Image: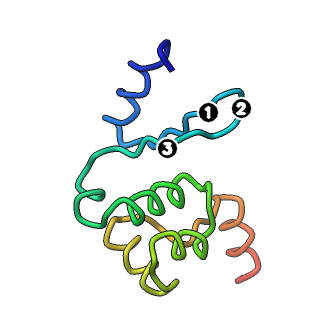
Amino acid sequence: MRERTGELIRDAEAGKLSVITRHGTPVFVAVPFDDTLLQEGVGAALAIKLFDEEHISLGRAAHMAGRSVGEMVDLLGRHGIAVIRITAEELGRELTDFD
């Protein structure tokens, strides 16, 4: 961590969550100190970040934030985070199937 302190700070300033490991084992999580953290609390902010970075599922995020799945969907929406994510390829297939 000593060698990467500057990188961790830059990532936090960019809104990125960091998982700090020791010999490959997670030790702690650095959550950016931002409006989400202040408004929603640590658990919800962590859940939002982990879901947004596609590390956890919607159900896991809801559980971590202490909310129902519906409440989590609303929370993510308020923060501008899409719950349903579709790739351009998937969208193309869907549109082809629609025709």
Q: Is residue 7 above or below residue 80?
A: above
User: Could you tell me which secondary element the residue under label 3 belongs to?
Assistant: strand
Q: Are marks 1 and 3 in contact (CB under 8 Å)?
A: no
Q: Horizontal and vertical percent for residue 24?
A: 71, 32
Answer left or right for 26 relative to 82: right
Label 1 – label 2 distance at C-alpha:
5 Å
Q: Horizontal and vertical percent for residue 88?
A: 64, 58
User: Could you tell me which secondary element the residue under label 2 belongs to?
Assistant: loop
Q: Disc number at residue 37?
A: none
Front-lying residue, 76 or 27: 27
Task: Identify which residue is drawn at 52% across, 41% down.
Answer: 28
Residue identifier under label 1: 21
Q: Callout 2 environment at 10 Å: few (<14), some (14 to 19), or many (20+)?
A: few
Label 2 – label 3 distance at C-alpha:
14 Å
Q: Horizontal and vertical percent for residue 94?
A: 71, 75
Task: Identify which residue is drawn at 44% across, 57% down.
Answer: 46
* Residue type beneath disc 3: Val
Q: Quadrant of the C terminus?
A: bottom right
* Residue type beneath disc 1: Thr
Q: Is residue 59 above or below residue 28?
A: below
Residue identifier under label 3: 29
